[in-house]
Image (cartoon, helix red, strand yellow):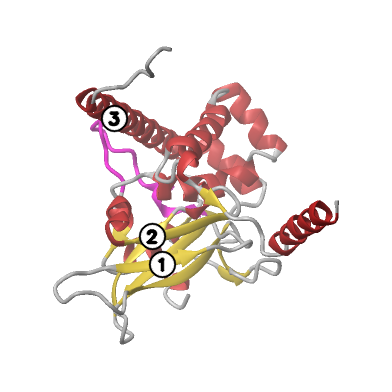
Amino acid sequence: MNEPDVIPRTRMRALRAAARAKAADRFERNRQAVIVVIEACRQLMADTKFRAILIRIGVSDAPRLLMRKSAPTEGRKSSFGDPSLEFVIAWSFFKPLFEQPAVVEYLSKKQPDFMMRMKDAFISLVLDGPFPLTEAVGRPARSVIPSQRAKTLRAGFSAKSG
Amino acid sequence: MEELPSRGALTSIDNFLFQPRINDEFTVSVGVGRTKKSSKPGTCEWQLGYRSRKKPDVFIIARADFVGTEVRDYFILPYMLLPHGAWLTVSGKNYDRLSSFRAETLDPFFELCAREKLELPQ
């Protein structure tokens, strides 16, 4: 009979450290990607033709954080240590606009990948952002628990009577 | 809510979620995280458990002592990024991972909500 493989403790520590480093690297890359997307939003808002379209469809104001001029230097930081909040504001502003035909038409001509980049950033933040999907815990609604309990009880009764 | 209009932001109540809605774009909810009653002197262990079917887009945690009403600081969380129905329990050291969302006052949140008029250059 074969002995089960035992991974030495030192090796396990090394594997865990490597996994942590990989996750941190992925997190940082996501963060930088989100910062780039927010800067793209600012550049779009600085486009006078895009602004004219927004005014025409009835948008009278926009988030101040998107109206700030883009910083010329790279690696610009957000107001918080994490750009997720700024992205939430930008996403809340742009998402309804993605349903406006005039906006979609303009973006498809001038920045055809803008909408896709916003959606990709949203998905990456849900999966690997400040609250990774793998760590989110969902509990069943309270109304489910009594029925589950009832099922268990019924199964128990029928087993006894059988 | 009173500070937001001075920054150009619109506030209303979402008719479906019964949560404050800012600029008709996103909803906000507020919770209080308190220190635990049995906290040892000199340590700061505090906790918050939050779960709601009515998931807000932004969730603000006001951290306070077990006794008293003074708020120590705030955590402004992008709750939109959590899956629906997620149970958020944060206590003790776990708050470290939220440090990038920490703020002494709500001014950063008000600044996030601030609006500017759209104008074309003359």
Amino acid type, mark 2:
Val
> Which chain does the numbered disc 2 sit on?
B
Q: Tell me the SS state at disc 1.
A: strand
Amino acid type, mark 3:
Arg
Q: Is residue A73 magenta?
A: yes
> Which chain does the numbered disc 1 sit on?
B
Image-based side of A61 in relation to A66, left or right: right
Could you say which is closer to the camera, residue B8 or residue A129? A129
CB under 8 Å between discs 1 and 2: yes
Q: Residue at x 25, y 30 (%)?
A: A74
Amino acid type, mark 1:
Leu
Residue B20 against residue A94 in the figure, above or below: below
> Which chain does the numbered disc 3 sit on?
A
Task: Residue lying at the far top in this picture: please name it.
Answer: A1
Q: Which residue is mark 1?
A: B48
Q: Which residue is mark 3?
A: A16
Mark yes or no: residue A47 visible.
Answer: no
Image-based side of B55 in relation to A21, left or right: right
Residue B99 against residue B122 in the figure, above or below: below
Mark 2 or 3: in front is: 3
Q: Residue at x 27, y 27 (%)?
A: A12
Quarter occupied by residue A98: top right
Few, some or many residues within 10 Å of mark 3 (<14, 14–19, 20+): few
Mark yes or no: residue A143 visible.
Answer: yes
Q: Position of residue B63 (x, y in %)?
A: 33, 71
Secondary structure mostly seen in magenta is loop
Q: Which residue is mark 2?
A: B90
Q: Which residues are magenta?
A: A62-78
Residue A44 against residue B45 in the figure, above or below: above
